[in-house]
Image (cartoon, helix red, strand yellow):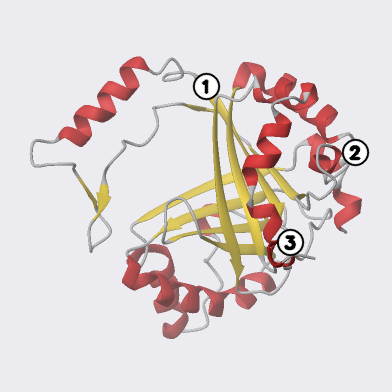
Amino acid sequence: MSRLTEAEDTPLKGHFMQVELLVEAQNAAAFEQQLAAFLGGSARPFARLDPSSGHELVLALKGLEAFVFAGEPPLGGALGASGAAEPLDAGGSAAHLARAVQCVDPRVGRRMVRYVHLWRLASRRDLELANIMMRSADDTPYMRVNALVGSERQDFVRIVQRQGWPGVDTSLGQCLRIVRRFASEKLGTYIFRSGVLVPILQERGWRLLGQFQNVTGPLNTVTELWQMRSGLDPQRMYDGALLGDLHQKLVDDVCSKLPFHEQRELCELPRYFGALIPAHA
């Protein structure tokens, strides 16, 4: 075995690829049908194209509510030390570029549904996406899915706060996806302090599937995936979980003081993933 092959076969622990897909609401049913056909009842559909592929679909989420697409984020902007977005130059060209992008983007104004797929990576070989993407371009089931996708983003992420993937609990109801972004100097503090709150929240009916830090894409970004017991309010998930002033400070830090951006979205498990859940139980 060559050194290159040995390196490619090095196991990866706690690394995933997070794929965010936007599909026009009117195409959502067809998208799910075509994706079910592509999966073919397997959590490792890419192994059909390349037997060495270790990409395993461990979670799929679908946003409960469609939203109006407002355009992609402007290109070229930078994050300042405070975490605030800075324009390209003093003339406000970032805003101008955002308007220009929206003017030529036919998706702007259309109702979209967000899907999020989490693929577990088995080895360093799975970081090489070019090979599998080239093979996918010749695969009819894959291209039928791709034709219905309005926007796609792929980011490598690593799990924090726990060592492995716990699997989906089918007895719980909806899922909550929280995306938070930070200035560089605040990221470590957030990861530590948010971890202290995890066991308290789990006692209250929240189950942490994972907390994932971006390795690629927008850096200093952390995505939390929670399953929730029916009846819980995602906008008040920290209420009733306080045990004194210390925990109130932790909640304030996690929810408002440390992140400069937060997005929460209620999700459900789409049907095409439901057929795969026993494989991850």
Q: Nearer the viewer, mark 2 or mark 1?
A: 2
- Left/right placement of residue 184 relative to residue 114 reads left
Farthest residue, direction left: 90
Q: Is 186 drawn above or below residue 90 in the view shown?
A: below
- Whole-angstrom CA distance, mark 2 to mark 3, is 30 Å
Element type where label 1 sits in the image: strand
The picture quadrant where one finds residue 12 is bottom right
The amino acid type of the residue labelled 2 equals Gly
- Whole-angstrom CA distance, mark 3 to mark 1, is 45 Å
Q: Earlier in the sequence, mark 2 or mark 3?
A: 3
Q: Between residues 245 and 131, which one lies in front from this camera angle?
A: 131
Q: Give the labeled residue for mark 1.
A: 111
Query: Residue, x 75% and y 37% (percent of image)?
Result: 270
Q: Nearer the viewer, mark 2 or mark 3?
A: 3
Element type where label 3 sits in the image: helix
Q: Give the labeled residue for mark 3.
A: 5
- Whole-angstrom CA distance, mark 2 to mark 1, is 29 Å
Q: Earlier in the sequence, mark 3 or mark 1?
A: 3
Q: Between residues 246 and 155, which one lies in front from this camera angle?
A: 155
Q: Earlier in the sequence, mark 2 or mark 1?
A: 2
- Left/right placement of residue 217 relative to residue 100 reads right
Q: Nearer the viewer, mark 3 or mark 1?
A: 3
Circle 1 packing at 10 Å, graded few (<14), some (14-19), many (20+), is some
Query: Residue, x 35% and y 71% (percent of image)?
Result: 186
Q: Between residues 235 and 133, which one lies in front from this camera angle?
A: 133
The amino acid type of the residue labelled 1 equals Arg
The answer, for residue 31, to whether it is visible in the render is no
Q: Give the labeled residue for mark 2.
A: 41
The amino acid type of the residue labelled 3 equals Thr
Q: Is 59 drawn above or below residue 9 in the view shown?
A: above
The answer, for residue 1, to whether it is visible in the render is yes
